[in-house]
Image (cartoon, rainbow, N blue to C red):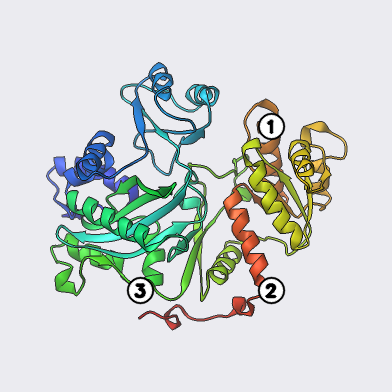
Amino acid sequence: GVICQFGGQTAINLAAPLAKRGVTVLGTSVDGMDRAEDRERFDEVLAKLNIPRPDGRIATSDKEAMQVSQELTFPLIVRPSYVLGGRAMEIVYNEKELERYLREAVIASPDHPILIDEYMVGREVEVDAVADGTDVYIPGIMEQVERAGVHSGDSIAVYPPQHLDQDMIDQIVDYTTRISLELQVKGSVNIQFVVSRGKLYIIEVNPRSSRTVPFLSKVTHFPIVEIATRIALGEKLKDMGYHSGLMPAKKHVAAKAPVFSFSKIGLAEIALGPEMKSTGEVMGIGHSYSEALYKAVNGAKMKIPAGGTILVTVADRDKAEALQLAEGFKELGYHIIATEGTGKYFNDHGMPVDIVRKIHEGGQNIATMIRNGKIDLVLNTLTYGKHPERDGFNLRRMAVELAVPCLTSLDTAREVLRVFANKGKNQGYHHVAALQDYDME
């Protein structure tokens, strides 16, 4: 037999062709995998279990895509079906952006439909579990720092979750258990949720191990791969001393931070979104959330300066949130500068900042300042339209190539601010201990 749970999406895609050729697929059945992977069959599973997911449609042509967008509420998240790593996945905020996506990113057809879902602003949560068809055991729940819409592989993940109440945790355990049993998972399963306006929704179910398995195994000391393999070979959780439910959270906190290689990949767009861009990850562990985050951010080589000048240039929809962040950084002693639109918003709302020229405006502009070492950190979010898109891309690439930290997610910036705000209060940030020295009871 062959186990298809530990080779990512490629192995899952190979399960059905292997079974057709007479190969025994161990663990979760090919039908169980297909019920999780096939959009319409998965919708049937959720409807049967009365578990909500973001409203969405399937389109098999550009015309149909524009029509179904009328039935949904913008912003929408659009992607080709059966994608890997969020390839060609994008968030569109209006019809014009959807038209551009259909023109430039994908060609919809009956053989290659595209999925269109309402994009729910909220907190993303991820679970890795093991199940044997009778019992479902959950070693831990992880919460992502970046809001839904940033690929989970590019997000900072935190264990145990810091912002979920007990009722929400109980609901996550309930949904995980019922879905795993309905799909008759035998081995490992990964489920991604979003908490939006106090309600829990399912984003997707992966009938396999995910990239978070090594992280969760290390911080809980629960050997997910070993247990999942033993289940696939016919053993039961109860016989191994486990039961259904959630493992009690450990007393320590761990954070998983993505590592990027943008400086080595010329012309790559560094802005974070639904398409995965990280090339690795690191783990920070500590006795507090801030300590774990500090270690993870440092381990990921996010060289955030302890002072200096921050350039803020953000999309209109992000200006109010960016203002709060800029005020926080200013209180820590940073000097804030901004481009015209952002700077005018800051000045109009009681925070005076120096306004600088964009790259395409020439003269003493952002490009000159970055080259002369006068900007220590860039906070930039994606905007659309001819000039801003080109200007923003050039700014992000210049920052990467000249080794100036560039944050494109306000959530990441907020956590970086938290790290620096707490650094002076907590002197244990540089405490070093072996993994097994942390409380593993």
Does residue 9 appear left or right of residue 252 in this picture? left
**Looking at the picture, does residue 418 appear above or below residue 105?**
below
Q: Position of residue 422 (x, y in %)?
A: 64, 69
> What kind of element bears circle 2?
loop
Q: Please, is residue 214 above or below residue 325 in the view?
A: below
Which of marks 3 and 2 precedes in the sequence?
Answer: 3
Which residue is identified by label 3? 221
- What residue appears at the point 40 percent right and 22 percent down from the top-left corner? 65
Q: Which residue is mark 2?
A: 424
Q: CA distance from mark 1 to mark 2?
A: 38 Å
Residue 33: which disc?
none
Between the C-alphas of marks 2 and 3, the distance is 31 Å
Instruction: Identify the image quadrant of the C terminus.
Output: bottom left
Question: Where residue 62 sits in the image (x, y, percent)?
Answer: 42, 19
Res 388 label:
1
Residue 23 lies, in percent from the top left, at 14, 48
